[in-house]
Amino acid sequence: MKTLFDTSVLVEHLRGEPRATSLLQSVPTRERLASVLTRIELEGGMRSGERQQVASLLGVLTLLPVTDAVARRAGEQLRQFRRSHPGIDLVDYAVGATAELNGATLATLNIRHFPMFKDLRKPW
């Protein structure tokens, strides 16, 4: 099953959290997805000594672009949830729209950032 990994799960994998690593490894390589925005978050938050580890992780993910369709859907979700769920940033709306439009399950530890997925649960 296609799975789009949010930054929160990937950071836990990089920190050595065995449940995050197990989840990542349980998804076939060709079905491991992430938004290009997740790449920005990972590369922006890494320390110099973590470059190789982050590069290796990114090498086993298919990075999906923010297309016009993703931007449109994220905008719709922002209009729908901005009052009831203040504080969700644009990256999370775009990540959610990317998962939805690509028919992927979203793997995240930040459930409250994704109200557009009614049955979303933490993976562990």
Image (spheres, rainbow, N blue to C red):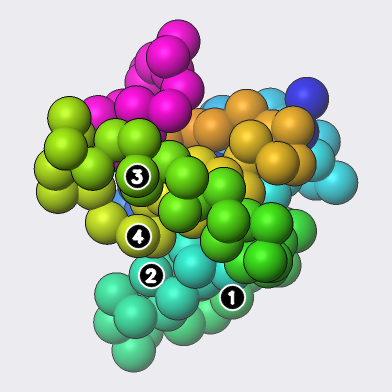
SS of the residue at dot 3?
helix
Tell me where residue 69 appears, x and y as whole percent: 69, 57
In the image: residue 68, left or right of residue 72: right
Tell me where residue 23 appears, x and y as whole percent: 56, 29
Callout 4: few (<14), some (14-19), or many (20+) C-alpha neighbours within 10 Å? few
Which region shows up in magenta? Answer: 109-124
Closest to the observer: 9 or 103? Answer: 103
Tell me where residue 70 appears, x and y as whole percent: 62, 56
The residue that appears at 57% across and 48% down in the rendered structure is 73
Q: Quadrant of residue 122?
A: top left
Tell me where residue 65 appears, x and y as whole percent: 68, 67
Callout 3: few (<14), some (14-19), or many (20+) C-alpha neighbours within 10 Å? few
Query: Which residue is the site of mark 2?
Result: 41
Q: What label sits on residue 55 in the rendered view? A: 1
Q: Nearer the viewer, mark 4 or mark 2?
A: 4
Q: What label sits on residue 79 in the rendered view? A: 3
The secondary structure that dominates the magenta segment is loop
Query: Which residue is the site of mark 4?
Result: 90
Q: Looking at the image, is 21 positioned above or below residue 124?
A: below
Q: Mark 3 to mark 2: distance in Å?
A: 24 Å
Hey, what amino acid is under mark 4?
A: Leu
